[in-house]
Image (cartoon, rainbow, N blue to C red):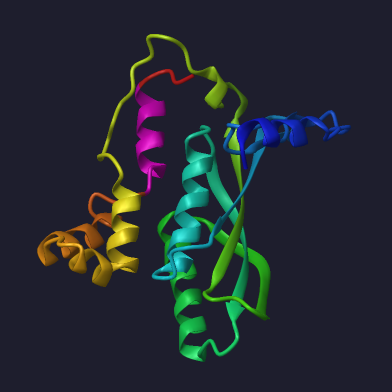
Amino acid sequence: LPLDMLEGLLDQIEVKDPRVVLGPRAGEDAALIDFGDRYLVAKTDPITFATDLIGWYVVQVNANDLAVMGATPRWLMVTLLLPEGTSADSVAGIFQQLREACAALNITLVGGHTEITYGLPRPVAVGALLGEADKAAVVLTSGVQAGDSIVLTKGVAIEGTAILAREAPDALAKAGVDTGVIERSRGLLFSPGISVVRDASVVRSAATVH
């Protein structure tokens, strides 16, 4: 949505619960809810384009958004919408991806919803991830300041490049992209990888992040 439209819609939401420290706000990655000695951090993010490794993707993108706010990802729920005719093997494969991705990041899959949905051209996965953060360690997008240092840990456009290579290899080859480049680009998901959970944890232990 256009930013001005989104901001106008979000401004109409009245948050009455005083425990909501950070509610719906354009540009911020997750919500913050006061749970006494720490914040509960809540995020939802869908995978609507990438069908290859969709279960793995939905864990990564939600975990990344919590990590960059200074939170530790803990509990995940997933809504999985599947086209008519989806095979049992495909469903089993998505669940395996979810289990393995959660295990690698020490996230517990606590529930969700599955549905065969009319009219879908491809699977859609929507993650809702909860985490926790020390109150003094929360990082907000709005905290950016002139003169800040930006540390690049892996590279530019890794995720987008990998998705294109995995979802549209034939179109890339037809456009003249070398097959070796396409194959190497497919591997960018895992090397250097798109997860920033470890990166965010390391930087918080080495410096003050705002």
Residue ID at (73%, 33%): 23
Q: Where is residue 27 drawn, in percent x and y?
A: 58, 31
Residue at 54% from the left image edge and 47% from the top image edge: 73
Residue 137 appears in the rendering = no
For the point 34% across and 23% down, which residue is it?
A: 206
User: x, y percentage for residue 158?
Assistant: 29, 48
**In the figure, residue 185 lies in which quadrant?**
bottom left
The percent coordinates of residue 139 (x first, y second) are 53, 26
Query: Which residue is at the front of the view, 197 or 185?
Result: 185
Say if the magenta span includes residue 198. Answer: yes
37 relative to 198, above or below: above
- In this image, 134 relative to 104: left or right? right
Quarter of the image for residue 46 reads: bottom right
Furthest residue to the top?
A: 147
Farthest front residue in view = 175
Q: What residue lies at 60% left-to-right and 76% top-to-bottom?
A: 120
Furthest toward the right, the residue is 16
**Residue 158 appears in the rendering:** yes
Q: Position of residue 134 (x, y in %)?
A: 58, 29
Tell me where the magenta segment starts and ends, as one range: 195-206
The secondary structure making up most of the magenta span is helix
Closest to the observer, 55 or 10:
10
When asked about the image quadrant of residue 180, the answer is bottom left
